[in-house]
Amino acid sequence: MNKVLIYSGIYILGVIISALAQILLKKSADVERESKLKEYLNFKTIFAYSIFFGATLCSVFAYKYVPLSMGPILGTTEYIFVAVLSYFLLKEKISKKKLLGLITIIVGVLIFSL
């Protein structure tokens, strides 16, 4: 199998992990805390930022074979994952504007891939 394809998959895995961390941060932000310090020093927030660190490691590792010009294109798929995960996990609606934006991202990624 092509190394670029494998490492692109690792990059996408990092993007998915990052999207999950964003959902976890959103859930953590919904909880009212007694102080500003407790907003940042709680399990969900610390865990989410740890996940972001793991996602960054995936990206750095993937750039070993993924061309630099391809990284930002793969990174834009995060918007898609966040929207889909928000729909299923947070029960957020996907408006017509969001859907149009997501379709634009998908078309852009497909055009770049071809």
Image (cartoon, helix red, strand yellow):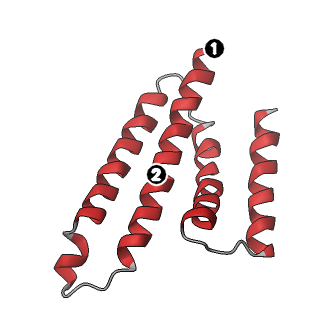
- How many numbered circles are shown? 2
Would you place residue 62 above or below residue 3 in this image? below
Identify the residue shown where x is 82% and y is 41%: 111
Q: CA distance from mark 1 to mark 2?
A: 25 Å
Given residues 32 and 12, the one toward you in this image is: 32
Identify the residue shown where x is 31% and y is 86%: 32
- For this view, does 69 lie left or right of residue 114? left
* Residue 17 coordinates in the image, percent (x, y): 46, 47
Q: Mark 2: which amino acid?
A: Ser
Label 1 sits on residue: 2
Would you place residue 66 above or below residue 78 in this image? above
- For this view, does 61 lie left or right of residue 84? left
Question: Is the residue marked by circle 1 packed among few (<14), some (14-19), or many (20+) residues within 10 Å?
Answer: few
Of the 4 image quadrants, the one containing the C terminus is top right
* Residue 87 coordinates in the image, percent (x, y): 63, 66
Label 2 sits on residue: 18
Q: Mark 1: which amino acid?
A: Asn
Q: Nearer the viewer, mark 1 or mark 2?
A: 2
SS label for mark 1 = loop
Identify the residue shown where x is 40% and y is 80%: 30
- Tell me which numbered mark, 1 or 2, is placed earlier along the sequence: 1
* Residue 16 coordinates in the image, percent (x, y): 52, 47
Of the 4 image quadrants, the one containing the N terminus is top right
Identify the residue shown where x is 37% and y is 37%: 57
Examine the image and state in which quarter residue 86 appears: bottom right
SS label for mark 2 = helix
